[in-house]
Image (cartoon, helix red, strand yellow):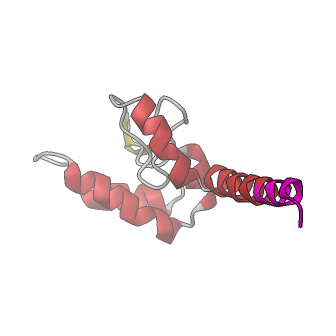
């Protein structure tokens, strides 16, 4: 094999590896959310995919009149089942200072699909 052929094979292998890596990163929202969080360090983020609120729309779940929370972005909320959503709401609720709203109100709203 000539020198030009070896360089061509090496170039193709590098291209394949780099393009595969890019497709993997871009298809995995949790991975590329790291870059968005670095670009927007002052924003909190979706608790599932990690995208900052500057780049995604939060899904607001109202548990009483005029009171709600949004631990998940609209995309993640739509793609998760009710059972898969609950831990993210519980995690957010647990991080709030005392006095906290009644967890049962939030859990009921999540189970109702609000």
Residue found farthest to the front:
2
Question: Does residue 49 appear anywhere in the picture?
Answer: yes
Picture coordinates of residue 91 (x, y %)? 30, 58
From what the image shows, is residue 3 above or below residue 34?
A: below
| Residue at the image point whose x is 51% and y is 60% from the top | 112
Whether residue 5 appears in magenta in the rendering, the answer is yes
Vertical side of 38 occupied by 29: above or below: below
Magenta stretch, residue numbers: 1-10
Principal SS element in the magenta part? helix
Q: Is residue 60 visible?
A: no
Q: Nearer the viewer, residue 1 or 109?
A: 1
**Does 77 sit above or below residue 85?**
above
Whether the magenta-drawn stretch holds residue 87 is answered as no
Outermost left residue:
98
Position of residue 103 measured from the top left corner of the image (x, y, whole percent)? 27, 59
Query: In the rendered view, does 24 fall on the left or right side of 15?
Result: left
Residue at the image position 30 percent from the left and 52 percent from the top: 92
From the viewer's perspective, is residue 92 above or below residue 6?
above
State which quadrant residue 14 falls in.
bottom right
x and y percentages locating residue 29 in the rendered image = 58, 51
């Amino acid at each position: 094999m000539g020198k030009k052929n070896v360089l061509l094979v090496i170039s193709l292998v590098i291209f394949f590896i780099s393009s595969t890596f890019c497709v993997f990163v871009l298809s995995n929202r949790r991975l590329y959310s790291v870059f968005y969080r670095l670009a927007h360090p002052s924003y909190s983020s979706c608790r599932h995919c990690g995208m900052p609120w500057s780049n995604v729309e939060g899904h607001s779940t109202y548990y009483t009149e005029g009171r709600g929370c949004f631990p998940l972005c609209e995309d993640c909320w739509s793609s998760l089942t009710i059972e898969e959503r609950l831990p993210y709401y519980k995690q957010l609720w647990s991080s709030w200072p005392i006095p906290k709203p009644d967890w049962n109100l939030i859990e009921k709203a999540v189970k109702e699909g609000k």
